[in-house]
Image (cartoon, coloured by chain):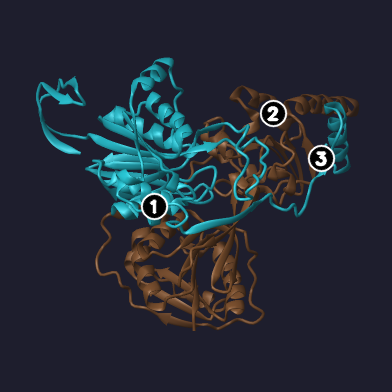
Chain colours: A cyan, B brown
Amino acid sequence: MELVWVVGQKIYENRWVTQFKTGLRERMCLDIIVCVKHVPETAEAELKIDVTGKGIEKAGLVFDINEWDDYALEEAVRIKEKFGGTVTAITVGPEDSESTLRKCLARGADKAIRLTDPKFAGSDAYATAKILHSVIRNLHFDLVLTGAQAGDDGSAVVGPVLAELLGIPHATMVKKIEFSDGKAIVNRELEGGLEERLEVKLPALFAVQTGINEPRYVSIMGIRKAMQKEVKVMGLADIGLTENDVGEAGSWLRIEKLYVPPVEKQAEFLKGSPDEIATKIVEILKSRGLI
Amino acid sequence: MTEIFVLAEHRQGQLRDITFEMLTKARELAEKTNAEPVAVILGKDVREHAKNLAEHAKKVLLVEDAKLENFNSEAYQRVLSHLIKEHKPILTIIGHTSYGVELAPRLAASLNIPLATDCIDLAFEGDTLTITRQMYGGKVNARATLRHAESYMVTVRQAAFQAQKPPTPLNGQIVEVPSPLTEEITTKRFLEYVLPPPGGVDITAADVLVGIGRGIKDQSNIPMVEELAKMLGGVLACSRPIVDKGWLPSDRQVGTSGKTVKPKLYIALGISGAFQHVLGMKNSDLIIAVNKDPKAPIFSFSDYGVVEDMFKVVPVLKNKISELKAQKA
């Protein structure tokens, strides 16, 4: 947010942007950082534990932007389109996570940064927040958006810890963001359909809940443009952290073992052709007096 | 004596169920570790709650302040930091609820206390805290340890522990702690509660619900399934992704962020069974689930399961029901 005397033209990102409005007015102009994660889509996949016993077999899984982050990115782009400003997408991840950043660029992000280092391996949500913080603290921002959680580990930790490290207020499970008098008014999701409205001073961090908007499809033009944009890559040496801050050493949590949850109760499976299955269902419903 | 803190969660004058679930687990852990279960309640005019909590804990820390009237994570963080520094509990347990996820990570980071979120089980082995949590939407469980520390923090999943009353009320001592909040919190302010818009359909009143999830694939497939619901004299319900996509209004959503239902029949079509959804429907009288993934968690909560493409089963099922109705008529 800045108070500017808007006249004629202003150099912005090496492009000439024509401002038609003149006069002294308050201009909302938000620089937004969106933190995204590249995760496997597992909702409809059958998962197997890998040989280490501490991860899942990734072969055959399709990776994409974390669903919650997808909504966060869309929200950032919508705010930029409404008020002006920039959107920078940041991820922590190896080379294959670049496709998620390309997607962000294609959908309207202006810049992308990928933080990667072999030493980052084993980082939990806390270590990841520290890595993100080490870079974001040197950038100008009015707003930081993250997803409320990630579909893989479901920690819901990175956003609020990042806000603590940055020393800015935050809100999680955010379902609506509006701006008024240099402050944000947000709706947070509570339980049972209830929401609460909060007023939060900017700069702030919001961890976005799914359903806050309808993420747009990427256009072919967008993808072409995105391919030409640069993704900045930074490692441990570039961000001012030590080995002890990241990876397992810098984490709160260490995974000892993954396993498929034991089945306490199992459904009785109805087998056969769709016709036979349907017949069995009808029999069950009849016997219960439901039809 | 070392203490185990449980943060009591309350809203609009009601202590929330998770408080008693956490206290039950805290008592069990306290017994094994020779610690004392302590309930911590923050609020305005919450003395009655404190009395209630005293039956479930050895001690209740009560902090009353007008600034704590409505939940505000900033205010809670300041008060809890003060209490944790003072008491040095071996463990602080907070609900993995909307309030808990707003508060716990930031509080833990500010105090440099290791935190594990959304835990479904907890155990001390010596002074190492081992936790169990779920990953990948409940398809995988992870056992993990927290970095060694003098104080730990966890958030626990709703309904992960069954709330039980102690055999005899503990008559815990209520300790009033003066509020450490000296100034108004200005960075973040609670404004109001927003009630869900009144919906046209009350799914909690229906005898038969047909619930749809991601497996429905496209909005254009919904009428086909809605017809099945109507044939059974029921209505259509859904899991969260369907509301997120705007395909059905939020009053059709079953789960922690939607409605809790208990119909005579719940047919789950293309619903994997994330715990948020399951908590809203697991007490239905009869549950039949159709899902392509044989390992979908929904099958652990269903009476009957069908591992098949819903688009192959539903049309045939509709035909069979029509035939039956024609015979009867």
Q: Quadrant of residue B142?
A: bottom right
Residue at the spot of label 3: A290
Residue A182 vs B98, above or below: the answer is above
Q: Is residue B76 left or right of residue B184?
A: right
SS class of the residue under badge 1?
helix
Tell which subunit mark 3 falls on.
A
Q: Is residue B15 left or right of residue B308?
A: left
Residue at 41%, 45% (x, y): give it: A207
SS label for mark 2 = helix
Residue drawn at point x = 58 percent, y = 70 percent: B124
**Residue that appears at 62% across and 55% down:** A257
Relative horizontal placement of residue A268, taking residue A28 as reference (left or right): right
Determine the CA span between mark 1 and mark 2. 40 Å
Write down the residue under mark 1: A160
Residue linked to disc 2: B225
Q: What's the residue type where badge 3 is placed?
A: Leu
| Closest to the observer, A64 or B54 | A64
> In the rendered view, would you say B95 is above or below A196?
below
* B172 relative to A258, above or below: below
Q: Position of residue A266 (x, y in %)?
A: 78, 49
Please say if the residues under marks 3 and 1 sit with CB atoms less than 8 Å apart: no
Foreground pick, B277 / B300: B300
Q: Name the image quarter holding the C terminus of chain A.
A: top right
The disc at residue A199 is none
- The x, y position of residue B204, in whole percent, is 64, 46
Q: Residues within 10 Å of mark 1 (few under 14, many from 20)?
A: many
